[in-house]
């Protein structure tokens, strides 16, 4: 029991550090990708090819003056960014990062905790995330910040409905809320005469889910809560130093966790073609690590897609954003549930 606890604590620390490092270098990757799209060079001063730029930015954030506006509610002004970064980090607890490994005769599970309502846990964490934005915008006592916070709250609530409905169709097929079981059901790449990854059974559900993921993470074209042309800086207008850094970090960590959830639910997670053959030839210690590398490759592809869209598609108007959520995505998600039920029932009736 003591050894298992040590392994679990080490896993928690490692995942936390990886989340922070990915968030740091996502800022670097975003600027490099934006520079490529706009025919610029991007960061190239701090270290070779600018790879130390995230560390320079972090040092700048730590050394900047801490300012709390005179009319702000001081306690909530500090709680807002803390809550945002906290909810962003705890979402990784139920994600299966790989198969079980054998190290020194001990079986190590590459998942912090496997709860039978893992999908509900993710949705609960996502719904809590908006509180950090809402509290920060309200506590700033700035009308532009408040408008940004209200936008964030209404946007997140609207798209959480579509996201929840899109996942129902997937749960009808998997029969479980455990992310670990969902990943295990997608073992390999091909099973029973069809692709085992859920994307091939739920393409419409995935499309709805990824659009909602853009809205939940406040990424362009859904970045209305921090629309600088209308709201100065949005909900974090009054923030400086590491309090602002927490909000920025929370966005990139949310993008990382959203990518991990999409990869696990729809794209096989740590599974890949020929994984059993690979594990049999490299052993039970190295095999699961290869699966983890595959999972991170999928995550980084999704992160690249987030950035690609940001520097390609213009921002929506707010009425367009709400129309998309309520008039298009919700009806589509409901239609997907009905279609999934009809097709599943028909296949069972004919013995497939």
Image: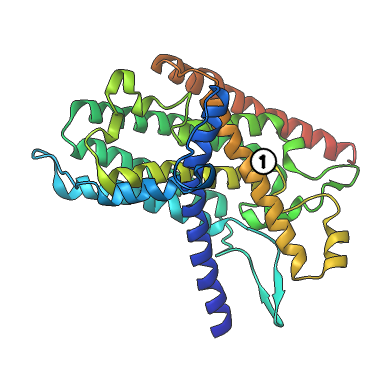
Q: Please state which of residues 51 and 160 is positioned toward the viewer in this rendering.
A: 51
In which quarter of the view is residue 301 placed? top right
Q: Secondary structure at mark 1?
A: helix
Is residue 279 visible in this depiction of the protein? Answer: yes
Position of 264 with respect to 93 (left or right) is right
Image quadrant occupied by the C terminus: top right
Q: x, y (%) of residue 131?
A: 32, 43
Q: x, y (%) of residue 213?
A: 53, 35
Position of 226 with respect to 72 (left or right) is right
Q: Residues within 10 Å of mark 1 (few under 14, many from 20)?
A: many
Q: Examine the rendered structure and indicate whether residue 54 appears above or below residue 178.
A: above
In which quarter of the view is residue 291 placed? bottom right
Q: Examine the rendered structure and indicate whether residue 77 appears above or below residue 233.
A: below
Q: Residue at x 46, y 49 (%)?
A: 52
Q: x, y (%) of residue 270?
A: 71, 53
Q: x, y (%) of residue 325?
A: 49, 23
Residue at the farthest bottom position: 2
In which quarter of the view is residue 67 placed? top left
Q: Residue at x 34, y 47 (%)?
A: 246
Q: What residue would you read off at disc 1?
A: 170
Q: Residue at x 55, y 65 (%)?
A: 112
Give the total of numbered labels: 1
Position of 208 with respect to 252 (left or right) is right
Q: Please state which of residues 57 and 228 is positioned toward the viewer in this rendering.
A: 57
Residue at the farthest left position: 70
Q: Please state which of residues 118 and 95 is positioned toward the viewer in this rendering.
A: 95
Is residue 1 visible in this depiction of the protein? Answer: no
Which color scheme did the rendering employ for the protein?
rainbow
Image quadrant occupied by the N terminus: bottom right
Q: Examine the rendered structure and indicate whether residue 3 appears above or below residue 258.
A: below
Q: Residue at x 33, y 51 (%)?
A: 59
């Amino acid at each position: 029991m003591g050894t298992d606890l040590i392994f679990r604590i080490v896993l928690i620390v490692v995942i936390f550090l990886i989340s922070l490092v990915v968030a740091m270098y996502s800022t670097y990757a975003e600027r490099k990708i934006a520079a490529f799209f706009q025919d610029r060079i991007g960061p190239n001063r701090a270290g070779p090819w600018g790879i130390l730029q995230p560390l320079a930015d972090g040092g700048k954030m730590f050394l900047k003056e801490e300012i709390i506006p005179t009319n702000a509610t001081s306690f909530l002004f500090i709680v807002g960014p803390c809550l945002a970064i906290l909810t962003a980090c705890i979402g990784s607890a139920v994600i299966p990062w790989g198969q079980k490994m054998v190290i020194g005769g001990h079986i190590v599970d590459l998942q912090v905790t496997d709860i039978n309502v893992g999908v509900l846990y993710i949705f609960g964490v996502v719904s809590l995330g908006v509180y950090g934005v809402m509290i920060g915008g309200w506590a700033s006592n700035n009308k532009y910040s408040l408008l940004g916070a209200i936008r964030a709250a209404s946007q997140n609530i609207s798209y959480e409905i579509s996201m929840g409905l899109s996942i129902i169709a997937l749960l009808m097929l998997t029969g479980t809320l455990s992310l670990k079981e969902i990943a295990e059901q997608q073992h390999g790449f091909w099973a029973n005469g069809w692709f085992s990854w859920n994307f091939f059974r739920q393409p419409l559900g995935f499309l709805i889910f990824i659009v909602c993921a853009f809205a939940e993470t406040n990424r362009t074209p859904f970045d209305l809560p921090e629309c600088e042309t209308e709201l100065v800086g949005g909900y974090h207008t009054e923030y400086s130093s590491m309090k602002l850094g927490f909000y920025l970090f929370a966005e990139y960590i949310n993008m990382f966790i959203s990518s991990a959830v999409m990869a696990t639910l729809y794209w096989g997670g740590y599974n890949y073609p020929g994984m059993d053959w690979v594990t049999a030839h490299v052993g039970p210690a190295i095999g699961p690590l290869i699966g983890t590398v595959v999972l991170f490759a999928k995550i980084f592809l999704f992160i690249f897609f987030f950035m690609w869209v940001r520097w390609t598609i213009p921002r929506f108007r707010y009425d367009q954003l709400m129309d998309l959520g309520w008039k298009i995505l919700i009806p589509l998600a409901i239609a997907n549930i009905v279609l999934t039920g009809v097709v599943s029932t028909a296949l069972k009736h004919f013995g497939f």
